[in-house]
Image (cartoon, helix red, strand yellow):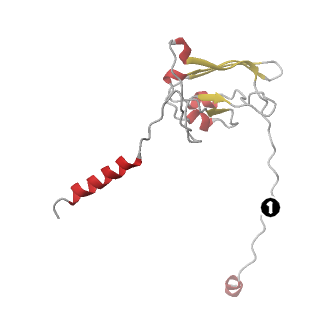
Amino acid sequence: MWGTGLIGGLIITMRNMLRGPITVKYPYEKLTLPKRARWAVVPTLDASGAPKCTACTACVRACPDHILGLDVTTREDKTKHIGRFSYEIGACMMCGLCVEACPFDAIAMGQDYELAVCSKEALTVDLLVGVDAAAVKRVKPAEKPAPEKPAPSETEVADE
């Protein structure tokens, strides 16, 4: 029938007109972001307040934009010291691949979305500077008992 599309469009328009404004007065009011929103990378800390980073460089290798930098020195006692863990906010596409690659949950995507700065130098942030890397806690897998051989079924016994 002629005009049904026009009437359907007018119904949608009237429904949206009656809904009311959905704007937010930004600096004074802020939206609550979803829990899984992805913004700038932030380091995570353990219960004692020390960084969880073990300096394994998995996040650096996983980053498609090569914006993470990790300067690590290994001491004679095989412990690692993080001289600088840098992050370029301006070049990051916030894909989250570095967070997914980290086996120790040492970095996470932060909730801060106000990332504008006035200078180009402020776009490079040091996440960690001059800290000892967390020790890797190796856990031995529990020994599993050998699987038992299943008992033969009635049809297998009858075939013999």
Question: What residue is rendered at 68% in x and 36% in y?
Answer: 105
Where does residue 106 sit, x and y in percent of width and height?
69, 32
Secondary element type, mark 1: loop
Is 35 or 51 nearer to us in this picture?
A: 35
Where does residue 58 sit, x and y in percent of width and height?
63, 31
> Are there few (<14), some (14-19), or many (20+) residues within 10 Å of tag 1?
few
Query: For mark 1, what is the residue?
Result: 146
> Taking 118 as reference, is 46 above or below it?
below
Is 77 or 49 nearer to us in this picture?
A: 49
The residue type indicated by label 1 comes to: Ala
Q: Which quadrant holds the N terminus? A: bottom left
Task: Work out which residue is located at the far left of the displayed protein and give it.
Answer: 2
Is 36 or 100 nearer to us in this picture?
A: 36
Question: What residue is rendered at 32% in x and 53% in y?
Answer: 12
Question: What residue is rendered at 75% in x and 25% in y?
Answer: 133
Where does residue 45 sit, x and y in percent of width and height?
74, 31
Where does residue 72 sit, x and y in percent of width and height?
70, 19
Question: What residue is rendered at 52% in x and 31% in y?
Answer: 94
Q: Which quadrant holds the C terminus? A: bottom right
**Quarter of the figure with residue 83:** top right
**Quarter of the figure with residue 46:** top right
